[in-house]
Amino acid sequence: MSLGRQVFFWISALVVFILFLFVFRTILLPFVAGTILAYLFNPVAGRIERLGFNRLVATLILLGGFLLIVVVGMVLLMPVLSHQVGGFVSNLPGYVTQLQRWVVTTFQGSRLGSIFGTSLQDLQTSLGSVTSDAASWLAGIVGSVWSGSQTIISSAALVVLTPVIAFYLLLDWDRMTAQVDGWLPRDHAPTIRRLLAEINAGVSGYIRGQVSVCLILGVYYAVGLTVVGLNFGILIGIMIGVISFIPYVGATVGLVTAVGVAVAQFWPDYASIGYVIVVFVIGQFLEGNILQPKLVGEHVGLHPVWLIFALFAFGTLFGFVGMLVAVPASAAVGVLARFALQRYLESPLYRGTRNGNGSGAS
């Protein structure tokens, strides 16, 4: 097969895959979630097998333990989160009004108005309009997300199908991978295996590490913000943990939300507001200097900007399912791009053929 036909084949396969995701994006969540669980648990299942258990027992142990943890977590956290979400949404307009009053008061007592040539009345009008729109938007988003989350949690498809799909995939994982390996074109099988191994090493390391980071940060911020007395500290902490898989976005959104609530709740108690900021300073130090280097490191080998773009792009196109496949897809693209670049740098197209020495010198 010529190079042109190979390129056409792989591009066509990629287009078909993307169209498949787009068309069936509304029903793919339990299948993608089950596949991710099986992928994450497969190495652990292998270790359990080496202890003398068969594959069926290893699968049952892993999925049974996972389901037990999920059920216990839901029983313990759902009542608290439901109460805090309702309270946060109902208190949001009041918090916004208090923040507006604080900004106006601070502006009135400073020289900023004369520096920027803005009157207090203009500031009140503009800030009132902006905060009103922002409050309505944020309340709608929080309400819809929570409603959607409740729908997902109560969905029989997710609750029932995900463990079933994960069970069968995990049980047959080795057989399926061996079968797929048998379909590889023989001439290119070693190269494809090497690329797949690089993708697997990056994706598995990143996902397992990032899940650990998100769990640790969620628990830390939930406990820390609750200890310093911040309203809705558990909700804000868990929210930070959940969105911490987006580089820099989780910490930024969490900081803005927590400090905004702290100012509205504690002002003019500077000490209490400072305690909230200290919690974030410590959290960012732990994440940047301990958790990320130790648990995640450079597994994916992708720039944070590319990861952020991939998460938002896939999320926009395919919804929550897209966000689940964004990191594996971007890691695969990164590995293939580096492979293509390496081939280009080794090719006559880059090196040139002048004087027959490949140096490109004239």
Image: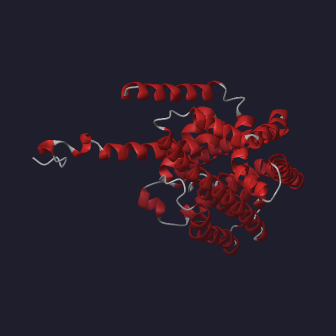
Can residue 138 be seen in the rendering of this structure?
A: yes
Residue drawn at the location 42% of the way across and 47% of the way down: 338
Residue drawn at 65 percent across, 40 percent down: 177
Query: Which corner quadrant holds the N terminus?
Result: top left
- 282 lies above or below 82: below
For the image, the number of numbered tags is 0
Q: Is residue 144 above or below residue 92?
A: above
Which residue is nearer to you in this view: 339 or 293? 339
Q: Is residue 146 above or below residue 234?
A: above
* Most foreground residue, 48 or 361: 48
In the image, residue 158 above or below residue 256: above
Question: Going by the image, does 342 lie left or right of 191?
Answer: left
Q: Which residue is located at x 88 percent, y 52 percent?
A: 68
Camera sees residue 333: no
Q: Residue at x 64, y 35 (%)?
A: 179
Residue 101: horizontal and vertical position, in percent?
A: 64, 57
